[in-house]
Protein backbone atom coordinates (compact mmCIF):
# COMPACT_ATOMS: atom_id res chain seq x y z
CA UNK A 1 0.00 0.00 0.00
CA UNK A 2 3.02 2.34 -0.05
CA UNK A 3 3.15 4.93 -2.80
CA UNK A 4 6.12 5.55 -5.06
CA UNK A 5 8.88 7.99 -4.15
CA UNK A 6 7.33 10.79 -6.22
CA UNK A 7 7.21 13.89 -4.01
CA UNK A 8 4.15 15.45 -2.47
CA UNK A 9 4.06 19.00 -3.88
CA UNK A 10 2.59 21.93 -1.94
CA UNK A 11 1.79 25.31 -3.47
CA UNK A 12 2.83 28.02 -0.98
CA UNK A 13 2.29 31.79 -1.06
CA UNK A 14 2.82 32.92 2.54
CA UNK A 15 -0.89 32.99 3.38
CA UNK A 16 -2.34 31.28 6.44
CA UNK A 17 -4.27 28.74 4.30
CA UNK A 18 -1.06 27.76 2.53
CA UNK A 19 0.75 27.24 5.85
CA UNK A 20 -2.10 24.98 6.94
CA UNK A 21 -1.55 23.11 3.68
CA UNK A 22 2.15 22.77 4.56
CA UNK A 23 1.28 21.32 7.97
CA UNK A 24 -1.17 18.87 6.46
CA UNK A 25 1.18 17.88 3.65
CA UNK A 26 4.09 17.32 6.05
CA UNK A 27 1.94 14.85 7.99
CA UNK A 28 0.83 13.24 4.74
CA UNK A 29 4.39 12.94 3.41
CA UNK A 30 5.42 11.22 6.65
CA UNK A 31 2.50 8.80 6.30
CA UNK A 32 3.34 8.04 2.68
CA UNK A 33 7.08 7.92 3.18
CA UNK A 34 7.73 10.40 0.33
CA UNK A 35 9.64 13.69 0.00
CA UNK A 36 7.90 17.04 0.40
CA UNK A 37 8.41 19.72 -2.26
CA UNK A 38 7.38 23.33 -1.56
CA UNK A 39 6.74 25.50 -4.63
CA UNK A 40 6.13 29.25 -4.92
CA UNK A 41 5.23 30.64 -8.36
CA UNK A 42 5.09 34.34 -9.21
CA UNK A 43 5.69 36.55 -12.24
CA UNK A 44 8.06 38.86 -10.31
CA UNK A 45 10.73 38.54 -13.04
CA UNK A 46 8.33 39.59 -15.81
CA UNK A 47 7.07 42.65 -13.96
CA UNK A 48 10.30 43.81 -12.30
CA UNK A 49 12.68 42.61 -15.01
CA UNK A 50 15.41 40.01 -15.03
CA UNK A 51 18.02 42.78 -15.40
CA UNK A 52 16.97 44.29 -12.08
CA UNK A 53 17.46 40.99 -10.32
CA UNK A 54 20.92 40.45 -11.83
CA UNK A 55 22.24 44.00 -12.21
CA UNK A 56 20.87 45.87 -9.23
CA UNK A 57 20.62 43.11 -6.70
CA UNK A 58 17.66 40.99 -5.69
CA UNK A 59 14.23 42.54 -6.30
CA UNK A 60 11.72 42.99 -3.49
CA UNK A 61 9.48 40.28 -4.94
CA UNK A 62 12.39 37.85 -5.24
CA UNK A 63 13.29 38.50 -1.62
CA UNK A 64 9.66 37.91 -0.66
CA UNK A 65 9.52 34.66 -2.65
CA UNK A 66 12.69 33.31 -1.04
CA UNK A 67 11.42 34.31 2.39
CA UNK A 68 8.10 32.54 1.79
CA UNK A 69 9.62 29.21 0.78
CA UNK A 70 12.26 29.34 3.53
CA UNK A 71 9.60 30.00 6.16
CA UNK A 72 7.41 27.21 4.76
CA UNK A 73 10.35 24.79 4.83
CA UNK A 74 11.11 25.62 8.48
CA UNK A 75 7.42 25.22 9.27
CA UNK A 76 7.35 21.76 7.67
CA UNK A 77 10.59 20.68 9.36
CA UNK A 78 9.20 21.60 12.78
CA UNK A 79 6.13 19.56 11.97
CA UNK A 80 7.89 16.45 10.61
CA UNK A 81 11.65 16.54 11.15
CA UNK A 82 12.30 13.26 9.32
CA UNK A 83 10.62 14.24 6.03
CA UNK A 84 12.97 15.20 3.19
CA UNK A 85 12.08 18.76 2.10
CA UNK A 86 13.00 20.70 -1.04
CA UNK A 87 11.92 24.14 -2.24
CA UNK A 88 11.56 25.92 -5.58
CA UNK A 89 10.75 29.49 -6.62
CA UNK A 90 9.34 29.66 -10.16
CA UNK A 91 9.03 33.01 -12.04
CA UNK A 92 5.75 32.16 -13.79
CA UNK A 93 2.00 32.00 -13.33
CA UNK A 94 0.94 29.69 -10.47
CA UNK A 95 -1.54 27.52 -12.43
CA UNK A 96 0.76 26.33 -15.25
CA UNK A 97 3.66 25.99 -12.81
CA UNK A 98 1.66 23.75 -10.48
CA UNK A 99 0.20 21.73 -13.35
CA UNK A 100 3.70 21.01 -14.59
CA UNK A 101 4.85 20.09 -11.08
CA UNK A 102 1.92 17.68 -10.88
CA UNK A 103 3.28 15.59 -13.74
CA UNK A 104 6.03 14.28 -11.46
CA UNK A 105 4.19 14.40 -8.12
CA UNK A 106 2.34 11.79 -6.09
CA UNK A 107 -0.21 14.54 -5.34
CA UNK A 108 -0.58 18.32 -5.20
CA UNK A 109 -1.70 19.97 -1.95
CA UNK A 110 -3.21 23.47 -1.96
CA UNK A 111 -4.83 25.82 0.49
CA UNK A 112 -8.40 26.80 -0.22
CA UNK A 113 -7.46 30.46 -0.77
CA UNK A 114 -4.37 32.52 -1.52
CA UNK A 115 -3.02 35.90 -0.45
CA UNK A 116 -4.19 37.74 -3.57
CA UNK A 117 -7.28 39.85 -4.20
CA UNK A 118 -9.59 36.82 -4.44
CA UNK A 119 -9.33 35.85 -0.78
CA UNK A 120 -12.99 36.66 -0.23
CA UNK A 121 -14.06 33.78 -2.47
CA UNK A 122 -15.06 30.42 -1.03
CA UNK A 123 -12.40 28.75 -3.18
CA UNK A 124 -9.48 30.51 -4.83
CA UNK A 125 -9.17 30.45 -8.62
CA UNK A 126 -5.73 28.79 -8.53
CA UNK A 127 -6.95 25.85 -6.44
CA UNK A 128 -10.02 25.41 -8.64
CA UNK A 129 -8.08 25.59 -11.93
CA UNK A 130 -5.40 23.15 -10.74
CA UNK A 131 -7.95 20.66 -9.37
CA UNK A 132 -9.78 20.77 -12.70
CA UNK A 133 -6.73 20.11 -14.89
CA UNK A 134 -3.98 18.29 -12.98
CA UNK A 135 -2.66 14.89 -14.02
CA UNK A 136 -2.24 13.78 -10.40
CA UNK A 137 -4.55 13.86 -7.36
CA UNK A 138 -5.13 17.36 -6.00
CA UNK A 139 -5.93 17.82 -2.31
CA UNK A 140 -7.52 21.13 -1.35
CA UNK A 141 -7.52 21.98 2.33
CA UNK A 142 -11.14 22.70 3.03
CA UNK A 143 -12.37 22.87 6.62
CA UNK A 144 -9.63 25.17 7.93
CA UNK A 145 -12.14 27.54 9.53
CA UNK A 146 -12.44 25.18 12.50
CA UNK A 147 -9.01 23.51 12.26
CA UNK A 148 -10.54 20.41 10.69
CA UNK A 149 -7.62 20.39 8.24
CA UNK A 150 -5.02 20.52 10.99
CA UNK A 151 -3.77 16.95 10.64
CA UNK A 152 -3.63 14.25 8.01
CA UNK A 153 -4.31 11.61 10.65
CA UNK A 154 -7.80 12.50 11.89
CA UNK A 155 -11.17 11.10 10.89
CA UNK A 156 -12.36 8.48 8.44
CA UNK A 157 -11.91 8.66 4.68
CA UNK A 158 -15.13 9.19 2.70
CA UNK A 159 -15.25 8.09 -0.94
CA UNK A 160 -17.92 9.33 -3.33
CA UNK A 161 -18.51 6.49 -5.82
CA UNK A 162 -19.40 7.85 -9.26
CA UNK A 163 -21.13 6.55 -12.37
CA UNK A 164 -18.13 4.65 -13.76
CA UNK A 165 -16.63 2.77 -10.81
CA UNK A 166 -14.75 0.07 -12.75
CA UNK A 167 -10.97 0.44 -12.42
CA UNK A 168 -11.44 3.78 -10.67
CA UNK A 169 -8.35 5.77 -9.72
CA UNK A 170 -10.39 7.48 -6.99
CA UNK A 171 -11.26 4.12 -5.40
CA UNK A 172 -7.63 3.01 -5.40
CA UNK A 173 -6.55 6.35 -3.93
CA UNK A 174 -9.17 6.12 -1.16
CA UNK A 175 -8.13 2.55 -0.28
CA UNK A 176 -4.50 3.68 -0.01
CA UNK A 177 -5.30 6.71 2.12
CA UNK A 178 -7.46 4.73 4.56
CA UNK A 179 -4.76 2.06 4.91
CA UNK A 180 -1.98 4.60 5.51
CA UNK A 181 -4.00 6.52 8.08
CA UNK A 182 -5.37 3.34 9.69
CA UNK A 183 -8.89 4.74 9.65
CA UNK A 184 -12.16 3.33 8.27
CA UNK A 185 -13.19 3.98 4.68
CA UNK A 186 -16.82 4.88 4.05
CA UNK A 187 -17.84 4.41 0.41
CA UNK A 188 -21.01 6.31 -0.46
CA UNK A 189 -23.22 6.04 -3.52
CA UNK A 190 -26.07 8.55 -3.80
CA UNK A 191 -29.23 7.75 -5.73
CA UNK A 192 -32.41 9.55 -6.71
CA UNK A 193 -35.79 8.50 -8.03
CA UNK A 194 -36.94 10.85 -10.83
CA UNK A 195 -40.35 12.36 -10.20
CA UNK A 196 -41.82 11.00 -13.46
CA UNK A 197 -41.19 7.42 -12.26
CA UNK A 198 -43.31 7.74 -9.11
CA UNK A 199 -46.86 6.41 -8.96
CA UNK A 200 -49.78 6.77 -6.61
CA UNK A 201 -50.94 3.18 -7.14
CA UNK A 202 -50.65 1.38 -3.76
CA UNK A 203 -49.28 -1.83 -5.36
CA UNK A 204 -46.50 0.12 -7.06
CA UNK A 205 -45.58 2.40 -4.19
CA UNK A 206 -41.85 2.35 -3.53
CA UNK A 207 -41.00 0.15 -6.55
CA UNK A 208 -39.12 2.76 -8.63
CA UNK A 209 -37.21 3.89 -5.56
CA UNK A 210 -36.27 0.30 -4.72
CA UNK A 211 -34.88 -0.26 -8.22
CA UNK A 212 -32.73 2.87 -8.05
CA UNK A 213 -31.42 1.89 -4.63
CA UNK A 214 -30.56 -1.60 -5.92
CA UNK A 215 -28.62 -0.06 -8.80
CA UNK A 216 -26.69 2.03 -6.28
CA UNK A 217 -25.85 -1.11 -4.31
CA UNK A 218 -24.64 -2.87 -7.48
CA UNK A 219 -22.48 0.17 -8.35
CA UNK A 220 -20.88 0.05 -4.91
CA UNK A 221 -20.25 -3.69 -5.22
CA UNK A 222 -18.55 -3.20 -8.60
CA UNK A 223 -16.35 -0.40 -7.29
CA UNK A 224 -15.30 -2.19 -4.12
CA UNK A 225 -14.70 -5.72 -5.30
CA UNK A 226 -10.94 -5.58 -4.62
CA UNK A 227 -10.75 -4.35 -1.03
CA UNK A 228 -7.15 -4.48 0.27
CA UNK A 229 -6.53 -6.59 3.33
CA UNK A 230 -6.70 -4.63 6.56
CA UNK A 231 -8.97 -1.82 5.31
CA UNK A 232 -12.11 -1.39 7.41
CA UNK A 233 -14.78 -0.71 4.81
CA UNK A 234 -18.30 0.62 5.29
CA UNK A 235 -20.69 0.77 2.32
CA UNK A 236 -23.62 3.16 2.25
CA UNK A 237 -26.27 4.20 -0.24
CA UNK A 238 -28.17 7.42 0.37
CA UNK A 239 -31.15 8.98 -1.36
CA UNK A 240 -30.57 12.54 -2.50
CA UNK A 241 -28.31 14.69 -4.70
CA UNK A 242 -24.74 13.42 -4.61
CA UNK A 243 -23.31 16.81 -3.65
CA UNK A 244 -25.67 17.08 -0.67
CA UNK A 245 -24.95 13.54 0.50
CA UNK A 246 -21.17 14.05 0.32
CA UNK A 247 -21.23 17.47 1.94
CA UNK A 248 -23.18 15.97 4.85
CA UNK A 249 -20.64 13.13 5.10
CA UNK A 250 -17.74 15.60 5.15
CA UNK A 251 -18.94 17.09 8.44
CA UNK A 252 -17.05 14.50 10.51
CA UNK A 253 -14.55 13.12 7.97
CA UNK A 254 -10.79 13.49 7.73
CA UNK A 255 -10.70 13.37 3.93
CA UNK A 256 -13.31 13.33 1.16
CA UNK A 257 -12.27 11.65 -2.11
CA UNK A 258 -14.02 12.24 -5.44
CA UNK A 259 -13.10 11.43 -9.02
CA UNK A 260 -12.87 13.72 -12.05
CA UNK A 261 -12.92 12.56 -15.67
CA UNK A 262 -10.08 13.79 -17.87
CA UNK A 263 -11.03 13.51 -21.53
CA UNK A 264 -8.40 13.52 -24.29
CA UNK A 265 -8.35 16.67 -26.38
CA UNK A 266 -10.41 18.67 -23.88
CA UNK A 267 -8.52 21.69 -22.53
CA UNK A 268 -11.17 23.42 -20.42
CA UNK A 269 -12.01 22.85 -16.77
CA UNK A 270 -12.62 19.11 -16.45
CA UNK A 271 -14.46 19.03 -13.17
CA UNK A 272 -17.95 17.63 -12.64
CA UNK A 273 -20.71 19.36 -10.71
CA UNK A 274 -20.25 17.17 -7.64
CA UNK A 275 -16.48 17.76 -7.41
CA UNK A 276 -17.03 21.47 -7.98
CA UNK A 277 -19.59 21.64 -5.15
CA UNK A 278 -17.51 19.77 -2.58
CA UNK A 279 -14.40 21.81 -3.39
CA UNK A 280 -16.35 24.95 -2.54
CA UNK A 281 -18.31 23.78 0.48
CA UNK A 282 -16.90 20.61 2.12
CA UNK A 283 -16.08 20.69 5.83
CA UNK A 284 -12.87 18.63 5.43
CA UNK A 285 -9.97 18.35 2.97
CA UNK A 286 -11.05 17.22 -0.51
CA UNK A 287 -9.00 14.99 -2.83
CA UNK A 288 -9.90 15.24 -6.53
CA UNK A 289 -8.48 12.19 -8.32
CA UNK A 290 -8.24 12.34 -12.14
CA UNK A 291 -9.48 9.43 -14.24
CA UNK A 292 -8.50 9.27 -17.90
CA UNK A 293 -11.54 8.48 -20.07
Image (cartoon, rainbow, N blue to C red):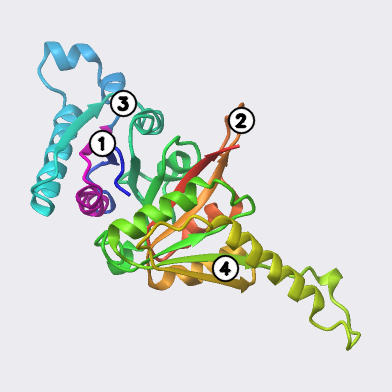
The quarter of the picture where residue 237 lies is bottom right
CB under 8 Å between discs 4 and 1: no
Residue beneath the point at 15% across and 32% down: 66
CB under 8 Å between discs 1 and 2: no
**Which numbered dot is residue 266?**
2
- Residue farthest to the bottom, as pictured: 202
User: Whole-percent x and y of residue 19?
Assistant: 22, 51
Q: Is residue 265 above or below residue 226?
A: above
Q: Earlier in the sequence, mark 4 or mark 1?
A: 1
Residue beneath the point at 63% across and 60% down: 219
Q: Is residue 4 above or below residue 32?
A: above
The span picked out in magenta is: 19-40
The number of discs equals 4
**Element carrying mark 4:** helix
Instruction: Say which of 55 and 215 sits in front.
Output: 215
CB under 8 Å between discs 3 and 2: no
Q: CA distance from mark 3 to mark 4?
A: 39 Å
**Element carrying mark 1:** loop
Instruction: Say which of 186 and 97 sits in front.
Output: 186
Residue beneath the point at 42% across and 55% down: 174
Residue 119 appears anywhere in the view: no
Residue at numbered disc 4: 244
The quarter of the picture where residue 117 lies is top left
Q: Which of labels 3 and 4 is toward the front?
A: 4
Q: Which of labels 1 and 3 is toward the front?
A: 1
**Element carrying mark 2:** loop
Residue at numbered disc 3: 43
Q: Earlier in the sequence, mark 1 or mark 3?
A: 1
* Left or right: residue 292 compared with residue 182: right
Q: Earlier in the sequence, mark 1 or mark 2?
A: 1
For label 1, the crowd category at 10 Å Cα-Cα, with few meaning under 14, some 14 to 19 and many 20 or more, is few
Amino acid sequence: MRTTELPLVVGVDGSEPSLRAVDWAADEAALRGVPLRLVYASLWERYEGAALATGLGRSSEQVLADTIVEAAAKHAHRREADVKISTEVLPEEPVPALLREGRTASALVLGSRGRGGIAELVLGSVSLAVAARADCPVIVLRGSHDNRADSARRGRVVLGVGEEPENSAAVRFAFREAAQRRVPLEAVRAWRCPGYETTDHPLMAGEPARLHEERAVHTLDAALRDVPEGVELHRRTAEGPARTVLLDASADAGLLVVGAQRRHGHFGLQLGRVAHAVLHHAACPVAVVPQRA
